[in-house]
Image (cartoon, grey):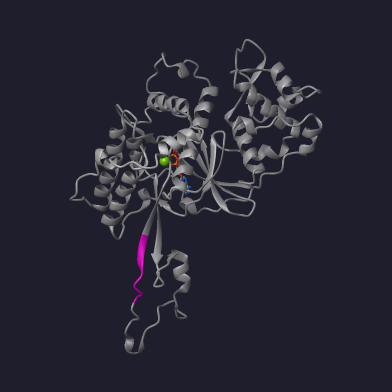
Amino acid sequence: MKLDTKAIRHLTAEDWRVLTAVEMGSKNHELVPTKLIGQISGLKSGVHRNISNLAKVNLIAKIQNAKYDGYRLTYGGLDYLALNTHRKSTSIYSVGNQIGVGKESDIYVVASAEGIQRVLKIHRLGRISFRTVKANRDYLRNRTSGSWMYMSRLAALKEFSIMKALHENDFPVPVPVAQSRHTIVMSLINAFPLRQISSVPDPAGLYAELLALIVRLAGVGLIHGDYNEFNILIEERKMGLDGKTHSLPDIEEEQELDALGNAPMLEGGTEVKEPTESITLVPTIIDFPQMVSIDHPNAQYYFDRDVACIKRFFSRRFHFTSDEPGPFFAESIKVVQNRLDIAVEASGFSRKMAKELDAYMKEVGADGIEGEGRAEGEEEDDDSELEEGGVLVQPEVGALPPTEDEEVLASQGGPVTAANLR
Ligand code: ADP
Ligand code: MG
């Protein structure tokens, strides 16, 4: 589903209020009765015009053959509510190009008001179909759009909480900026997925570093669970003579070239010795909705699979195979300090939520157990995740307009705040 921000500028304060009312009503109703929408929004003048405005641009929708008159929130409506929250908190000012389409997410480059580029990840669970349907699972009994949205929120909340914990503990992950509903905003990593890297100067070094990260994660109680060449971004940095790292353009600018663009030659035609600079590959890990605790019943399986993924990729792509066995799960969890899995649970992504999301992942096969998993599936999936130019695309400027005067809301008894829905 594309993110279409065109209609945002046309929504009035009352439209926003009614949209928020539909979201609140969705907590208890699959189909929110029109009457309830009116009550929650508290608009005296009636809500029919606002409802029709919102339905026209597909932010809310009717359900066919419903027993009563009502509306449900669409993914588009949820997108708008989240964008509006990000806009108000100034984490997003404009939305640019889509740079990734995962199986269950859309990735956009966005910019803050100061022009800082960031990444907006919109979780869209429910896009892939169930492999099996087990009717006895509570959360599945009602496979409504509402429950997909709930699962997407859980995925976003989990991903954000984990990213935050990892970032605070100096793991190489994007900087988490904000989370609202089914979306997160994070820093843009100026790098390409390992999948797109055809050769590296020192495969053994990178291999060791990536495996060491798996062990380090286990050491804080976590297993990535989808540690593959799509979820590891590799930035190339040159280490200059000054011992500092430079991104590539820096170095190029500093090099002295003659008028023809050649490196200067010494008298006698001896070429100037290349400065002894080395290229460092800096990995960043992304994509955390499927991460599991080392206490998970299948922890060892996930750990081994993450390790195997790296081994397989390095052997196929770089023809590199290590002589050393392991790393092994049992050894990696011998000394566990600073349990981030427990910290994440305490930070708002509760054990109950974890169970619900876990059950969902199992159901759609995203855990990869029993048959084709996502890790395997992605491998076949060529380079379709990134458009040409990858992460370096510039966002088109399409500023999110301010919503209508918020004073209008205040004068009508205060806005229905979205904050408590987050
Ligand atoms: P999915 O769960 O759909 O796989 P990911 O979080 O892995 O979503 O993101 C999909 C793709 O988007 C990644 O493979 C990467 O190319 C790109 N991407 C995601 N987050 C970032 C980021 N912070 N910076 C740069 N590129 C990113
Ligand atoms: Mg991914």
Give the x, y percent position of residue 125.
48, 30
Image coordinates of residue 222 in percent, x first then y, are: 37, 39
Measured as percent of width and height from the top left, residue 20 is found at: 67, 29
Q: Nearer the viewer, residue 142 or 169?
A: 169
Camera-nearest residue between 242 and 26: 242
Direction from residue 82 to residue 404 in the image, left or right: right
Magenta span:
274-280
Quadrant of the rendered structure where residue 370 is?
top left
Residue 223 visible somewhere in the drawing: no
Residue at the image point whose x is 25% and y is 38% from the top: 330
Which image quarter holds the C terminus?
A: top right
Measured along the vertical axis of the image, is residue 70 above or below residue 378? above
* Image height of 129 relative to 110, above or below: above
Q: Residue furthest bottom?
A: 268
Q: Is residue 359 left or right of residue 408?
A: left
Farthest residue toward the top?
67
Can you give x and y, in whole percent of width and height, for residue 368 in the image? 33, 31
Q: Quadrant of residue 135?
A: top left
Quarter for ligand 2? top left
Near-viewer residue (329 or 15)? 329
Foreground residue, 335 or 321?
335
Q: Is residue 133 visible?
A: yes
Q: Is residue 221 above or below residue 296?
A: below
Circle count: 0
**Residue lying at 43% horizontally and 25% vertically, measured from the top left:** 355
Q: Residue at x 49, y 19 (%)?
A: 143
Left or right of 158 in this view: 199: left
Magenta residue check for 258: no
